[in-house]
Image: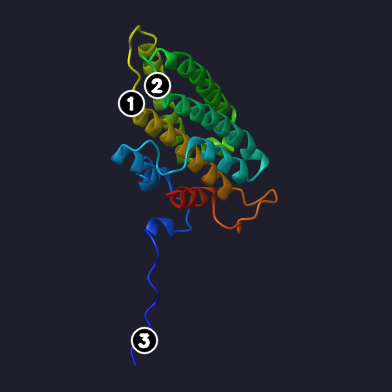
Amino acid sequence: MASEQPPPLLGPKIFQSTRPLSALESWPSSSAFGMARDTGSPSPSSRNFGDFSEFLRASVADEESLQMGESLQDLSTQIESMTEEWRLPHPDGTWLAAGLLALLDALREHHRMLLDLNRDWDRFIEFKAHLVSLNQFRTNVTQWADTAQLPGAQPPLQSAFDVSAWRMLGAGALLLDVYEQSCKVEGISAEAPGSAWSRLIAWIRNGD
């Protein structure tokens, strides 16, 4: 009698692995976030930046990651407010300048917060990946703000803004994940159901 075959894995293999994903494996080519880049859709799924903020609020694992999680929450809330305003009709792009400049201040604060974190964070490749995506987003926001202040200027495509923002926020979520995986002391259980990154991927996919 033929041996019984194991049931097939459900979904892409990348979502089945329990091993923490490295930045080189998952960013920025992660299929979940790359969807926005490849399709031009405003976000990776029907989820929005406000939903992302709520997800982070429920996913912070310990005191060490609380500051990082709150900073990402603040950024995602501010970004969501801008995307809602983006959907309204405007004669030109000058309305966008004030919001972009305020966002730029928040991004600078997030950058300072990252540099103030202890050495448990910056030893990760994902820390450097988040810094790269953050600096790229800051560069984009600075250029967009300069352009938006010109009379009659047109705003950038919202999809370009959304993809750059999602890339930065997603890299931050990945950093939270690898930090969580490294915290096997201080009362944090390594057996918790799913890492922050795997929960984030599942959360995005469930919003489709």
> Which residue type does callout 3 highlight?
Ser
> Which residue type does callout 2 highlight?
Pro
Question: Does 169 sit above or below residue 189?
Answer: above
Outermost residue toward the bottom?
1
Image quadrant for the N terminus?
A: bottom left
Q: Earlier in the sequence, mark 2 or mark 1?
A: 2
Question: Does 178 sit above or below residue 143?
Answer: below
- Circle 2 is placed at which residue position? 89
Question: Does 152 sit above or below residue 208?
Answer: above
Numbered tag placed on residue 31 in the rendering: none
Left or right for 38, reference 89:
left
Left or right for 169, reference 34:
right
- Circle 3 is placed at which residue position? 3
Q: Position of residue 156 (x, y in %)?
A: 34, 22
Residue displayed at 43% across by 35% down: 166
Residues tagged 1 and 3 counted as in contact (Cβ below 8 A) = no
> Which residue type does callout 1 highlight?
Leu
Numbered tag placed on residue 157 in the rendering: 1
Outermost residue toward the top?
151
Front in this rendered view, residue 158 or 11: 158
Q: Secondary structure at mark 1?
A: loop
Residue 118 visible in rendering:
no
Q: Position of residue 157 (x, y in %)?
A: 33, 26
Q: Secondary structure at mark 3?
A: loop
Between label 2 and label 3, give the one nearer the viewer. Answer: 2
